[in-house]
Amino acid sequence: MFFSLAVAVYACKQPNHASQKPTLFLIGDSTVKNGKGKGDGGLWGWGNFLPAYFDTTKILVRNNALGGTSSRTFRTMGLWDKVLVNIKPGDFVMIQFGHNDSSPVNDTLRARGTIKSNGDESEEIDNLITKKHETVHSYGWYLRQYIADVKAKGATAIVLSPVPRNTWKEGKANRNGQDYGKWAAEAANQGGAYFIDLNKIISDRYEAEGEAKVKAEYFNTTDHTHTIEAGAQVNAASVIQGLKEQKNIPLNKFLNSDARKKKVLP
């Protein structure tokens, strides 16, 4: 009798995943969610505008990105653990890091950098901020850990190349196909995740519209990384364009009717 009661109580405490809607989790840096996600300083991340493309009666969208983080520190700060515990079979996780990964590996300011590759090399440090010994890995290595964690939960991982900064050279946008975009694609392929080349999609649009328009309409005059609302809207639409271009990604079935029928970007 006592055993049966205990089993019943335990069962009641367990989440009934079968009756829950799937969730799309977003993890990344401030280009995904700037500040508190309320337009801090007039700047926005693309994650704020992504829910408008989905049928939210069938899927939830949770923006768990945090400004200032790298693929490394999102894990070491415990932020990933807080997301991972809520991931269930059938969920989706979009992963976009890279802007802060080029920072120093060990300094007294952030100590957030990663090794610039998709290899398995590592560096032993005594972290100047945490005062703890740490093994620092490559950018691609951290991405592969996220992918493995997501897949172990029965969820789907989607890696995105980092959005371009507002830096130009002879009319060409800030592409990263030879470094972080390349490493992100390699990590996704090795880990068995989907990959959206978000940097290329946005860079193609930027170059078509021209440097002057992009600078005037998508960014403010003092920040070369973070977008104002119009720029974040473009980036969100670019995510959806990349998603729709790969019809085999199961997340497509949760797009709302407008997003499915219309061309997302003009």
Image (cartoon, rainbow, N blue to C red):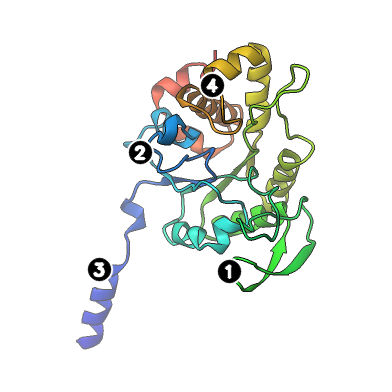
Identify whether 158 is placed above or below 109: above
Residue under label 1: 130
* CA distance for labels 2 and 4: 31 Å
Q: Are marks 2 and 4 in contact (CB under 8 Å)?
A: no
Given this view, does label 1 or label 4 mark the residue nearer the observer?
A: 1
Q: Quadrant of the N terminus?
A: bottom left
What residue is pinned by disc 3? 12
Of badges 4 and 3, nearer the viewer stands 4
Callout 4: SS = loop
Query: Tag 1 or tag 3, which sits nearer the N-term?
Result: 3
For residue 218, the mark is 4
Q: Residues within 10 Å of mark 2 (few under 14, many from 20)?
A: some
How many C-alpha atoms fall within 10 Å of the one at disc 3: few (<14), some, or many (≥20)? few
Kindly check if marks 1 and 4 are in contact, taking CB atoms under 8 A apart as contact.
Answer: no
Q: Earlier in the sequence, mark 2 or mark 1?
A: 2
Q: Give left or right: position of 169 versus 248.
A: right
